[in-house]
Amino acid sequence: MNSAMRSIIWTGALLASVTISIVARAGEPAPSRPPIDKCVWEKLADKNVGLAAWVQRCDFGFRQIHFEFAGNALTIKYSDGGAADPLVEVFDIQPGETAEAALLRLFLEKTDKAVSARCVPTSYTEGSVPTGVTRYTFSPDPAYAKELEALADPNEVPEPPCGDWGEMPDGIQYFEVPAGEARKLLFVRAGQDEPLFDEQTLRVLPAG
């Protein structure tokens, strides 16, 4: 091995150690699982959005995937697709408002009244929920659920009973109240499979 190659390897190791020490000093969690094949984890943060997240950058040859921030959201971008899709949206909890009141307000703002009147907030407990984090969804009330059950076709995937901001029959999405004192609320669209962002280590950034 020549001296130039040794220098490159030594420099790479040094940079890796610096990155690890910075993460450790900041108390940042590492990704909760290994990346999938052809992907690597990278950390994204945006103070304007108010969110930090571990995301995967992927290169499958025919398709590249990366994440970026846009508007109030962490979005996923496909090289062979159109506009980036929002996967984690960040919303403010208004002064004097509880987190539960904020998620109800958002759900009512974004859902047809005929549907929202028949849906109720419920705890979302599927999968592993990080310590200190609370997750919610909106589900049909008992009378509405009974009606839907009577109409269900076992051979078809039903429409979301509570609209696009409630529970999904063929995917995972929920409102998340982060741990700590942050006055923020997240809406997380994890999808059908294990997402390419780490839903276990999302972190709301302090204001300013």
Image (spheres, rainbow, N blue to C red):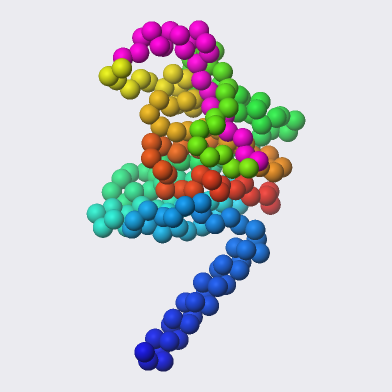
* Residue 60, above or below 150: below
Query: Residue at coordinates 52% horizontally, 11% vertically from top-left?
Result: 142
Image position, residue 192 (x, y; %): 38, 36
Image position, residue 141 (x, y; %): 53, 13
Question: Left or right of 42: which side holds 203?
Answer: right
Q: Please tell me in which quadrant of the rendered image residue 105 appears.
A: top right
Residue 2 in view, yes or no: yes
Residue sitting farthest toward the right? 96
Image position, residue 168 (x, y; %): 43, 27
Residue sitting farthest toward the left? 62
The answer to which of 74 and 147 lies nearer the viewer is 147
Question: Left or right of 180: which side holds 124?
Answer: left
Image position, residue 153 (x, y; %): 31, 14
Query: Residue at coordinates 51% horizontally, 20% vertically from top-left?
Result: 139
* Residue 107, above or below 175: above
Q: Which residues lie in the magenta part?
A: 132-153
Residue 178 in view, yes or no: no
Query: Residue at coordinates 41% horizontally, 11% vertically from top-left?
Result: 148
